[in-house]
Amino acid sequence: MNLEIALRLCFPGSLFIGGGMPCYGMDKALVRAADGNLVIPASTVKGRLRDHCERVLRSLEQPICHPPNPAITCPHFWWDKDQARSYEEPCAICVLFGSPWRQAALRVSSLACRTPEGFTAEEWRRFPYRTAVRPGVSISRARRAAASNRLFTVETAAVGVNLEFEGCIRGQLPRRAYVAILRAGLQSLVALGGNKSRGLGWVERPEAVEEAETGWWFTIRWEGEPYGDEDYAADLKEWGHD
């Protein structure tokens, strides 16, 4: 059964998604696409969403395995706990996000940075302040002071420019109830990337998006039809939510 979720994340502050190629004068660089545009990798989105979905299922007292160790994921996790479960009955997390033994039902795209308002695509590509460099220093927790000779620099997204990133999640789910877990996970996602304690990566809902179905920064369509609040409430009951 077809699922499609359109994502649009707005970062009113700055953002740091590490993993780019370090260069002279910069220890931690941003991830970029092949054309140089800023991008949030699919692995970052999928990992954060998976973590929040696990929390949702635990709050609903639903049994889930313990990734990422292959020895304690489905189906091995259940062998000495519930003999009735089989490979055809994995936990909801393994169904949605996969495991070493099972292909994921979801396909998550990387989120590409949109051209901000007031710029053309070419102007934004050549904009010299598209990124900034922040200095930092490591802290010695034993001494409770700055560590000696541990100055570092971090490349962040532009400050003062509301950056918006777009992408999508698609998949073939065995039943609609799984969509409720995904929506609950997305609603609890408030930040992405590193240095969140320093104010980086906090998500804000973009005002320009018309989202009558959910009122959030994403839109969900199930079998081509909008997935609304009534569908959400009905599906949560299947997971034991009153």
Image (tube, rainbow, N blue to C red):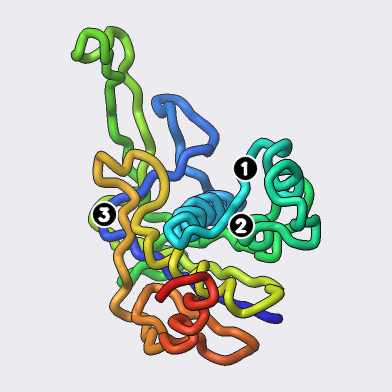
Q: How crowded is mark 3: few (under 14 residues within 10 Å), some or many (20 or more)?
A: some
Q: Is residue 89 left or right of residue 46?
A: right
Name the residue: 27% across, 8% down: 148
The picture places residue 115, in percent across and down from the top left corner, at 42, 67
Residue closest to the eye, 20 or 233: 233
Q: Quadrant of the C terminus?
A: bottom left
Left/right of residue 158 with respect to residue 85 in the rendered view = left
Q: Residues within 10 Å of mark 2 (few under 14, many from 20)?
A: many
SS for callout 1: loop
- Badge number at residue 13: 3
Alpha carbons under labels 3 and 1: distance apart = 33 Å
Under mark 2, the amino acid is Ile
The residue drawn where x is 58% and y is 50% is 43
Q: Quadrant of residue 173?
A: bottom right
Q: Mark 1 to mark 2: distance in Å?
A: 9 Å
Give the number of callouts. Answer: 3
Whether residues under marks 1 and 2 lie with C-beta atoms below 8 angstroms apart, the answer is yes
Q: How far apart are marks 3 and 2 (CA)?
A: 32 Å
